Amino acid sequence: MSIQAPRGTYDILPGQSEKWQEIEQKINELCRLYQYKEIRTPVFEHTELFQRGVGDTTDIVQKEMYTFQDRGNRSLTLRPEGTASVVRSFVENKLFGLPDQPVKLFYTGPMFRYERPQAGRMRQFVQFGVEAIGSKDPAIDAEVISLAMELYRSVGLKRLRLVINSLGDTESRLAHKEALVAHFAPRIDEFCSDCQTRLEKNPLRILDCKVDRDHPLMATAPSLADYLNEESQAYFDDVKMYLEELDIDYVVDPNLVRGLDYYNHTAFEIMSDAEGFGAITTLCGGGRYNGLVEDLGGPESPGIGFAMSIERLLLALEMEKVEIGKSQNLEVYVIAMDESAKKQAFSLLKDFRANGISADMDYTGRKLKAQMKSADRKGASYVIVIGETEMASGKAGLKEMATGEQQELLFSEMAETIKNRKTLEE
């Protein structure tokens, strides 16, 4: 019986890995432009971090976490999302003491959730996210949103829709919570067991329920927008003003609540409107989390961030038929006709690579014709054939595959000649 990858995981093979590399390069460059610095946190954390940071009423904590006991009988969890880990690190390493605030961070790495695998949603998935911690300026909300939008645009996506909402401050949310409890309580027995549990703990999460989303009470539930106090409304108006200043179109959706307990004020999602994408169109989600740093033992440090699945980004590219990550063709393929020529060929590879020129040769003892076919499959720009004559003269022909033209050169001239040609082409 062959051993296969666990359900919900997959291998990224050559031909696909180039797409990932291009996205990662764009992430690094974009974060450099916006001045977000990379942070790398452990793949597993103490379970309590996610119970406190994500919220024990969320589906993530209740149903989806990979939790285990280590040999010291400690409860540990593979990270299901990135924000809690980043905020934990922010507190533990006292980044709140840095002179420049907010602290602007980004991360890219694997996350783990036990859910039903489907296109673009796996049990191990790669998430890119940013966190700006230490400012309650609505302008930073707009900046974070614009960074997410710019990444999607930079890889060629066009069918995008930004949806935003305000979840309000503590006072606004408390008033809305009381209204939700009064609305759902008389008929809560008609809802799923999760919603019945959420009624008192976090009734806002009922609005995010996928099981009961068609219940008639959902359509008539009190809107959070009606309970925003003056300060919360002014904050939201400023966020919208800054988005307009950045020429970013948006749609306000009063039913957007997000799935994590730590959000307040600004919440947003970026959707794909590409044909064939499926029922779940969300590419990216995020929002403001004032209070999370304090919940994890730090001082008052308001924050905002987002997270996006790279797998879903790739799926959106596929739906819009956008090609990225084309393989870089091989520059030089060296063919050795016999064992005596192989040493010289191997030496040439060293020279080429030292000069930044990609080079390869045969390691299976194939005949000339087979090696030429291999050079063609690899898309080699140049081919060099070394046999007895070439070894005796110290020269070989540098054949340009696109034109068939051949130039006789000393072995010592090969690397410099190709390097100069590359410079002229650039």
Image (tube, helix red, strand yellow):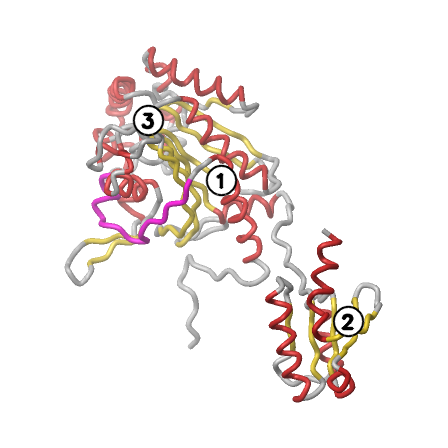
- In this rendering, would 30 be left or right of 344? left
Q: Is residue 268 above or below residue 321?
A: above
**Residue at point 38%, 33% (across, down):** 132
> Disc 1 designates what residue?
32
Mark 3 or mark 1, which is nearer to you? 1
What amino acid is found at the position of numbered circle 3 in the picture?
Asn
The numbered mark at residue 398 is 2
> Is 181 contained in the magenta span?
no
- Give the number of marks: 3
- The correct choice, above or below, for 180 with respect to 420 in the image is above
* Residues at circles 3 and 1 in contact by the CB criterion of under 8 Å: no
x and y percent of residue 236 in the render?
Answer: 41, 18
**Mark 2 or mark 1, earlier in chain:** 1
Question: Which of the pair 180/185 is nearer the observer?
Answer: 180
> Is 156 in front, or is 420?
420
- Residue type at the position of mark 1: Arg
Picture disc at residue 264? 3
Look at the image and give the residue range highlighted in magenta.
37-52
